[in-house]
Structures are given as C-alpha cells and as structure tokens.
C-alpha cells in the first residue's frame, strides 16, 4: 500500500503514478469486478465484472458468427495421450497442466475424504483444445467438400499459474477458441490473418483499445504453430499486454491427429489448420488502459450501463415526483439506438446518500450520470456528468435536448477514450537505433523507480541470443514484428549485434 | 440395431415403437446434434446441438435477469475441505467427483508423460457450486441490507457417470445454477418456488414441454436440501425426465459456511439459502418429447432456424433468378417479429440434390421448409411444408400471403407440438388405487417387451420401505408429490401398506 490521500480527491489509493500494480488491484475492488478465491490463482468474477464479459462475448460472438464460424462445445478433459501427439505442443503446456487422477472420494481412517478410484489413464484439464478438437476433425473430414471447417467455442481453460493476477493471469480463465481446417496453406493462413483483423476492429471499435498487430518471433510462438500473429495493447504503465493471438498451425496438428482429406484431384492430403483466441484478460487490459485515479472508465459500447440516473430525494414529499420523473427519463433513454442496440440505463433507487451512490458509479466507470432532485424538476434542466471529464464538470440539458444529444454524447465519449489511449500509445513509442538509447529507455530511473519504458521500434537481426540477453538485462521481450512497416524503411543495423536487419520489431516489458 | 426400413418411409431406423433408446441415438446422429468423445461419458456438442443450447440460454437468461438475478462466475475447482462442510452434501456427491491431484506433467523413464507436482490438498471439480459460493457469501454478507442476494452462473460441471447417455446423463454437462441468500425461511422458500414457476413457464411456453411440478420425497432430495422441488416431463416411451430442480436449503449451507447477517433487531442470524438449475439435459428431453420417426421436431421458439428456403435449380439458366428470389424472400422473413424476436431463416444454397437437402432439414426438425424452383417463380405461389405434419402435405401461398401468415403459422405449429405432448402426458397418466392395477401398469408386456407404463397417481403413506420395494420390483421411483391436487380429494389408502395417505404422488420409470 502506498500513501493515503487525506483530502480524498481521488477514489483510488494509491494513484496510478504512485503504484500502478496496486492501483490496478484497488480499482478491481472499488468497481467490485472480481476477487481472489481460496483456490490459488482462481478468481471469482462478480456481477459487474461478469456483465463486462457478457458484453464482450455478445459482440464478439456476433462478429465470429457473421464470418461463418459456428459454435460448438468440446469436453473439458483431454486424454493424456492426445496431448502427447504434437511434440512442441506438449512441451509448451506440460508444466502448467492440472491433472485429474481419481473419480471418487472415500472416507479414510482419519475420517477425512481422500481421492479414490484411480483412473487407468489420467485426464488433463484443457489448457487449450487443439488436440481434442483435432481428434474430432480427423473423424469429421473426408474430402475437400467438408472444408473449410470453421468452429468456435466459449469455454473455461486451466493453465497452472505461479504468479496469478486478477483477469490478466489466472489459473482458470474464460475465453473463446476458434479452430479451423482448410484445404490449402494459403487459405489457412488467410483465415488466421482475417481473424487478427476481426479482433483489431473489435478492440479499436468496441473496446476503444488501440493495438499493434504483427507476428511473434519464433521464441514467442504458440507451441505447435508455424506462425503466431498477435495484438498488443499498451496500458498506462507503458507495459504491453498481449490481448489476442491467432495461429497458422501448418500441418503440425493435422499430422499429429491424422486430419486428412481427399483433394479435388483425388489425392489424400493432410489439411492445414488455424486456431485463435481472446480471453477474460481483455477485461484486465480495459481497466489498465482506460482507468483513472477514480476507478474504472468504460467505453460506452462495452459498458453494462451507459447512463445511470440518481434520484436525489431530500424531502419525503418530493420522493414520488422525483422517482416518477427518473423512471420516465429512463423509459425514454431505453428507446434510443446506439451502436446497433438500445441504450442501457438504470435508476439507482437505493435509499443512500447521493454522494455515496454517485461515487459508486464513478468507480464502476459508467459513462454518464444524471442527477435528479427537486431543482431539476422545477427548472426542467438535467444535470449531466461525464465519467471521462473532470469530476466537477457538468453540462445542463433540457429533457428533450438530452435525449436528442445522447447518442452523439456517447459517441464523443467513445472517441475521446480511444483518442486518449491512442495518444498515450503514440507518445510512448520510440524509434530507437542505438544500444545506449535503448538501454536508457528501458532502465532509467523516474522518481526513484525504474521506468517501464514503452514500445521501442528497433532493428533486430533475428538472433535468439539478442532476445535472451535483452530479456535478462531489461526484462523485455519482442512483442511482435509489426505488420505496418514504413515503406520508405529499407532496413537498418541491429544495434545489439551490428548485423543488418530487414525491419524494426517492437520491444517492451509485458504482463 | 433393429429392423431396417427397405422402403425408407422413415428417416430414422429403428422407429420409436421398435427401440426407443436406439431411436434416440439415431435422431441425435441424424440431426448432427452431438457425439460421444473418447473421454468416457463426455460428449461433443456439435453446431446444431449447441445452437439449441444457445437458444435455451438466451431466453432463460433473460427471464432469470428480469427477476433480479445477476450473473457471476465461480472457480471450477473446489477445495476438498469445502465439500466436507455439509455432511449430507458430501455424502451425496463423493461417489462421482473428479479429483485433481497434480498440476504438472513430466516425462518419465518410459518416455511418456506422467502427473507431477502433487497438490498439498486435492481439488474437486465442481459437481455443483453450493460450497464454494457459500464461502464467498459468508464474506459478502454482513447485514440484512445485503439481502436478498440473488446470483446465477452458466457453467460446466462434472459428475462421474457410470452409464452415460448423450445429453441426458453425461459426466460433464452444461447448466445454469442459481444461488440465493435470504433473511427469512419464508422468503428463501418463496424464491425456490418462484423459480419453479419461472422454469415451468419457460418449459411450457418456450419448449412446448408440459411438466408436472411438485416436491421430491425425502429419498430423492438434493443432498443438503430441506426441500427439493422438481419439474418432471414425460417423453414418448412414457418415462419421466427430471428437467429442473429448485431447492430450499434451509440453514444447512449457511451453518456449514458461516453465512450470517445482522438482522433488523441487531441480532446475528444464520441466513436461509436456495439453489436451482437446469442443464443440457433439456435438449435430450426436447428430442425425446417431440421427435418422430423422421428425426427431430423443434418448437419454432427454440429452433435455431424457423424457416429454411430450398432453391431447386435444375437448369443452370434459372439459377440466378431462383437464388435472387430465395434471397429476397429470406430478407422479408427476417424482418418479421415472432415471440419477441426477428425470425430466423436460411437459404440453403449448397449444390446438392433437393431431396438430400430437404431430408437434412427434416431430420434437424426445422418447422417450415419452402421450396423454390422455376415453377414457383412463374406461378408466384410458394410451396410450404410443415415439419409437424405428414411429409406429403404441403400448403400453397402467394409471396405476400405467406409473409402475412407466417407468425400465425408458426404459432400454430408451436401450439400443436405442445398439445400433442400434453395429450400424450394426459393419455399416459392414471389414477391407480389397487396394487394389482399398479403392478400391471408398470410390468405388463406389450409386443414381447415390458411396458414403461406412464405416470401413476397413487396414494402413498410416506414410508421409505414402500419406495424401496417398488424400486426393486418395478424400477420405478416417486417423481414428485405434485403441487396440483384435486381439492375434492380428501386422501385415501396406500395400496401397498394399507395405511392412510393424505395425497397421491406420481410414480414412474425415469431417465
């Protein structure tokens, strides 16, 4: 814990600038998003946090279905032997697999329960589902007519986590995983890339989250993939968060699982596959990217509520009038279209002080608060407060004027949140061509603490040694080889090895 | 497998009357709903099956939220000690718990992977979440102001299953589980009962599934409940399926988990809780209740598609005209409201024989099929086939007439499917007052096979011995003590013991 704020100017203590990781935990607590359970590394997602996940699910599911993918559900359990079929894959996941070894509990002589009925073959809880889905693909696919096969599932997965952090890194997490099979490598790669586009549009448009997209270097690839494409966001301590990945799996999993098809020429071929996913980690990224010293700040599209109405009843005789007015306003707001849906609004009727209630919604990040007291009713002017502005700022509207302006107001907030994140990303990205500047960028001190730097765009010669050395020295990794390259850039010199390099890659510290 | 049908009059072999359990498996295969995985007892839910689950989820979720419940997500893992807190509860579930004992895999001397890094305390995969949610409730609840607390989660659960059957009884299944906490026993019981009403309306209205609602006898209660309320459907082999349960848990779990609150008088009290759930078992019930010898028959509300349009292209030169017409029709259908949503329609453009395509949608149970060939375009009359009628039957409509009639047509199908199931339930329910008639009802032979009887409404004196004896003799159980009792009925004599009995209970064979 760091310094308290005696004047309580800010709802969250510590502030972001004081202790970012602790600020993050405190925002989650203040917005009542989630908490740790007694099962190490596993979180409890509370109503406001789960509502965020439902918003993400709904929108992303729509986009995934629109592009021809169908939802399915595969078993939680993977037979141990399945996992072993793809050598790199099992290598990558073996260290973090939860293993089921028994299917019954029995009372022991100590009066306590103990595992009983051992399984002949242990079962692994899915860390990802390529192997079990691959086994089904090999049964389902006979000929090119069965291709492409495009499926997706929403599921929980488990990867044993030694240093868990709410939403960003938990032993159990929720995600969607897409799995597709194709008749040619070009098509499978195109699928993996088109999903990166889908994710990027979703993140920029719906989560107001600018991302850098590109390819992972070999060292950071998904175990078993030929290529891993990634989306990297920058959060407010200037670290990177990998928010989504999409993999071209080549024929690795089709060979491991015997996914073959008769091609148009009548020849048996191994198919080409892809897989891709995003998870509840997106919620952690939203918090870290947009939150401020008063808590969560939500883009209107993803916010479970866009408007909250706070009736301020001071005298009992005003109560009915005020509540009726609030309800009528909510009724009108619910009829308004925004971003393809009806607006979501709530009247907070709880009998508590207006200040307490107001702070609650500030901390939860709701875009607009409308306070309604006797004055608002007599003047017929609404007082509206925006979460993205200074707390003291307010705007006044007539009832009709507000309803008319509402979609534009929310669109403006959405735009503003995106622009702020985009500017932050831009301001904290550097083209760096010398080793000295690079080391200074990632290791200089700021207020007695090591800075996190930002995103460094630097030439790299492709050597693993350089990666290892920089990881050891600066705790940084190559986040990606970005797709967007300056066309004028004809390559340069890797400042670490002195070797020629074709392109700049993005280095950063990461969650 | 039973007799083949040489004339292929029916799509499913065997027919229901020949071998109902095998018919059920064949319908699932023919409609491509699900299949067994190689993990014993765990199924793969395929796109059409999962789409059904999504329809169920969407509608039920809406109703659960409307009644003030909020969604959350709790961990998959339950510490072993949690499970032991409620004695009856652990007794009930110990025999079917999957246990995680290790969190890593390591290569052994045999070159194969083996479980490594044993856990200090094993983790149980949730068979249901009362205990882990109860632990959180005890942290969250301090005073009566925190009550009622109403939450729900959509999750996978695992109960090790010795005799699995797709959808009806699987080791892993998907469900929703509601968990609520209240300040009085009356309120908690009322919650459990109001959820039974919610389920009943959903099943009758949305799934076209008539159900008998009532209370379970003590022997069939949820482990740890004071009362278990149940909804029992009858499927076409006249067996019962328990399709949903709701439990008044008294103070059993609040005492086990220390869920206490300061009441209005400032006294510390243990709270009263309830829990309730429905699962993917609903899909199995839908199949068995409504399916026929040609496959699935879906009520329009729950069907992923309500109309399928089949372009019949015989000459290449007609193709564009026919496809355009089909697309235009689909566009108009999608604008129509039905049961609070827009209609769901698909144009099946695949280049296959019309017969093959048509049979596919018949087996999948889509309510309406519209065939469009050159004749339909020149006559401007649409040929419409209803899944709930004889296969040969068809109706003709003008383009505009069809669009206008569509909602009424679908409502009529929905009503018809419900009425058929309701009549079946009625026709196979008997008031039985003698032991001889009772035994004959459940054990007489029909075409060389034992009949399954139906629902017997019979007086029961409440003795466990009678239950045991009848279970042994006839493989039947008391499905429920129905809420709806004849008011004129002043009680009678239990035909098995000769003791007086206050009311009739429902006996049946069950899945």
Image: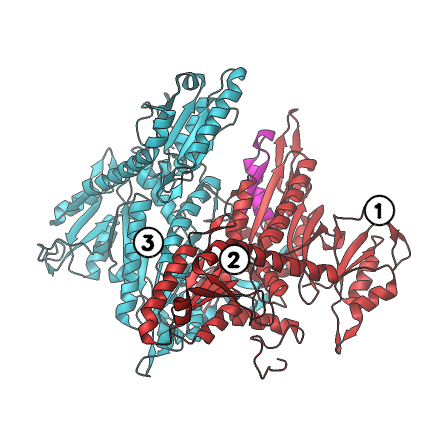
Chain colours: A red, B cyan
Q: Is residue B347 magenta?
A: no
Q: What chain does mark 2 sit on? A: A
Quadrant in the rendering for residue B253: bottom left
Say which quadrant the N terminus of chain B sits in. Answer: top left
- The label shown at residue A285 is none
x and y, in percent, of residue A412 in the image:
58, 56
- The 10 Å Cα crowd at callout 3, few under 14, some 14 to 19, many 20 or more, is many
**SS of the residue under disc 1:** loop
Residue B159 seen in the current view? no
Q: Which residue is mark 3?
A: B244
Front-most of residues B256 and A336:
A336
**Viewer-side label of 1, 2:** 1
Q: Residues within 10 Å of mark 2 (few under 14, many from 20)?
A: many
- Horizontal side, residue B370 vs residue B462: left or right: right
Q: Position of residue A185 (x, y in %)?
A: 69, 37
Label 1 neighbour load within 10 Å: few <14, some 14-19, many 20+: few
Q: Which label was assigned to residue A53?
A: 2
Q: Position of residue A333 (x, y in %)?
A: 43, 56
Same chain assignment for discs 1 and 2? yes
Q: Which residues are magenta?
A: A129-152
* Tag of residue A488: 1
Single out the mark in the foreground, 3 or 1: 1
Please give left or right for residue B21 compared with residue B154 in the image. Answer: left
């Amino acid at each position: 814990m760091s310094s308290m704020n005696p004047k309580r100017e800010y709802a969250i203590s510590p502030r972001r600038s004081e202790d970012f990781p602790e600020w993050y935990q405190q925002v989650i607590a203040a917005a009542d998003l989630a908490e740790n359970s007694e099962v190490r590394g596993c979180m409890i997602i509370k109503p406001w946090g789960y509502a965020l996940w439902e918003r993400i699910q709904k929108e992303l599911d729509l986009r995934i279905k629109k592009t021809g993918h169908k939802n399915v559900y595969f078993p939680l359990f993977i037979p141990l032997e399945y996992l072993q079929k793809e050598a790199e894959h099992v290598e990558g996941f073996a260290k973090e697999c939860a293993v089921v070894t028994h299917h019954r509990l029995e009372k022991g002589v100590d009066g306590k329960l103990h595992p009983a009925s051992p399984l002949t073959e242990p079962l692994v809880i899915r860390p990802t589902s390529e192997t079990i889905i691959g086994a089904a693909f090999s049964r389902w696919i006979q000929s090119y007519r069965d291709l492409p096969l495009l499926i997706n599932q929403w599921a929980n997965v488990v990867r044993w986590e030694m240093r868990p952090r709410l939403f960003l890194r938990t032993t159990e997490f929720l995600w969607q995983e897409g799995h597709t099979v194709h008749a040619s490598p070009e098509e499978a790669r195109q699928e993996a890339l088109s999903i990166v586009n889908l994710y990027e549009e979703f993140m920029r448009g719906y989560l107001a989250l600018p991302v850098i997209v590109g390819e992972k270097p070999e060292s950071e690839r998904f175990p078993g993939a030929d290529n891993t494409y990634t989306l990297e966001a920058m959060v407010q301590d200037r670290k990177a968060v990998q928010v989504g990945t999409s993999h071209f799996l080549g024929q690795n999993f089709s060979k491991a699982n015997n996914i073959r098809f008769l091609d148009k020429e009548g020849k048996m071929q191994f198919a080409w596959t892809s897989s891709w996913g995003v998870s509840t980690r997106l919620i952690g990224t939203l918090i870290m990217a947009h939150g401020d010293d008063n808590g969560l700040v939500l883009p209107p599209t993803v916010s479970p509520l866009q408007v909250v109405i706070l009736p301020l009843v001071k005298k009992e005789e005003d109560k009915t009038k005020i509540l009726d007015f609030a309800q009528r306003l909510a009724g009108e707001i619910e009829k308004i279209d925004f971003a393809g849906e009806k607006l979501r609004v709530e009247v907070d009727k709880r009998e508590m002080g207006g200040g307490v209630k107001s702070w609650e919604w500030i901390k939860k990040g709701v875009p607009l608060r409308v306070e309604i007291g006797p004055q608002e009713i007599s003047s017929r002017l609404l007082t509206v407060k925006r979460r993205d502005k200074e707390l003291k700022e307010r705007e006044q509207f007539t009832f009709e004027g507000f309803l008319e302006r509402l979609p534009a107001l929310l669109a403006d907030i959405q735009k503003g949140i995106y622009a702020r994140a985009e500017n932050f990303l831009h301001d904290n990205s550097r083209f760096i061509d010398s080793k000295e500047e690079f080391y200074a960028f990632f290791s200089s001190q700021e207020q007695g603490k090591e800075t996190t730097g930002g995103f460094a765009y630097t030439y790299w010669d492709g050597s693993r040694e350089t990666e290892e050395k920089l990881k050891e020295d600066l705790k940084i990794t190559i986040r990606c080889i970005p797709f967007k390259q300056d066309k004028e850039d004809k390559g340069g010199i890797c400042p670490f090895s002195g070797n020629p390099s074709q392109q700049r890659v993005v280095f950063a510290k990461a969650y």
